Image (spheres, helix red, strand yellow):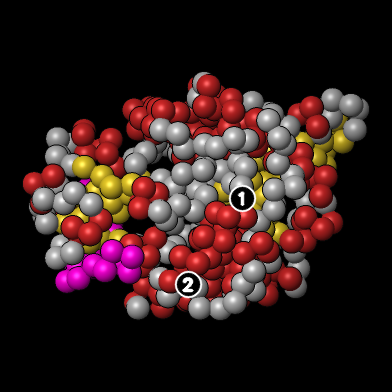
Amino acid sequence: MQQIRRMLAVATAVLAAVALGACGSSNDKGSESGSGSGGGKTENVTLLMNWFAQAEQGGYWQAQAADTGKSQGISIKVLQGGPQIQTIPQVAAGKADFGVAQADELMLARAEGVPVVEVFGGMDKYLQCMMYHPSSGIKDFGDISGHQVAVAPSGGFWPWIKGHYHLQNVKEINFTGTLAEFKRNKNLVQQCFTTSEPYFADQQGIDHAELLVADAGYNPYAQGLFTSERMIKEHPDTVRKVVAAVQEGWRQFLEDPTKARDLVLSVNKDMEKGPFDFAWKTLKDGDFFGTPLGGMTAERWNTLHQQLEEAGVLTKKVDPNSVWTDEFIPKQ
């Protein structure tokens, strides 16, 4: 329940930010400057990331680095996120044109009345996983009963896992984002991204194994691109062009991450080539993207809606179809 209360507190902050933004949004569709390939003005748009620059956002950084919107008169500026950045209230308030979020986060925000819509599904497979020590005897999610678990209060995956597998005698502690406690405590299970923590565990010589949350059936679209209802209503051509540029950015990134990596490493001084390349290879080889890139289905969104209700996280009425649209996604 503590986790749910924290998520509701975040939702309240989202609504407050939206109310403030409605009083004076300064940048509805970006600014215009320079000349496009057709002699017209180049439209500048901003994409706000949900964390520090990293490979898991690679297609968006590639869109900027390779200027994939140039032929359509779109110039994409990607903005690095961080622990104090919440993309949903920023975009809803008009402080950024587009943002990146997980599908369950958008569903919960929409239930609170925040007018945001996912326009590009990002990854077809959820990156979240649970890391454990092989010596613990864990083989599946049901075996987590009786263990200490480090999780952060976000999204709905952990409440759903707990309920779906009827976990008992689980002691939850705060996820710190490091492997220090995991290395010391052989009884600890902690959340992770399959593209990140396994690399660092290997570097530190820590025995580890992972259970991918998507394999359990909880599989929201990951790292998806969203915007405001207002943007869609007033500037649908801008949305269409940005989605096409982003889709091309992801296509290029999965083929060759060099341009995106160079940009990410220049923006995020704490990022290094090793973990970036590990994440890229995991994404490339792990069947994390569908066809077309960024495509979505009503069935997946309806399933997510049902799972969030079952987990007790989604307590207000929301139409799942109001949270997303695929009308702007080019068919490959």
- Binning the other alpha carbons within 10 Å of mark 2 as few (below 14), some (14 to 19) or many (20 upward) gives some
The image shows residue 131 at horizontal and vertical percentages of 24, 48
In the rendered structure, which segment of residues is drawn in magenta? 162-179
**Amino acid beneath label 2:** Glu
- Residue shown at 79%/45% (left/top)? 238
Based on the picture, tell me whether residue 41 belongs to the magenta stretch. no
Instruction: Report the quarter where the C terminus lies.
Output: top right
Question: Tag 2, which secondary structure?
Answer: helix
The image shows residue 160 at horizontal and vertical percentages of 37, 65
The residue that mark 1 highlights is 297
- Residue shown at 75%/47% (left/top)? 327
The residue that mark 2 highlights is 309
Extreme residue in the right direction: 39
State whether residue 298 is above or below residue 241.
Answer: below
Regarding residue 65, the answer to whether it shows in the image is: no
Along the horizontal axis of the image, is 16 left or right of 152?
right
Extreme residue in the front direction: 299
Q: Picture quarter containing residue 237?
A: top right
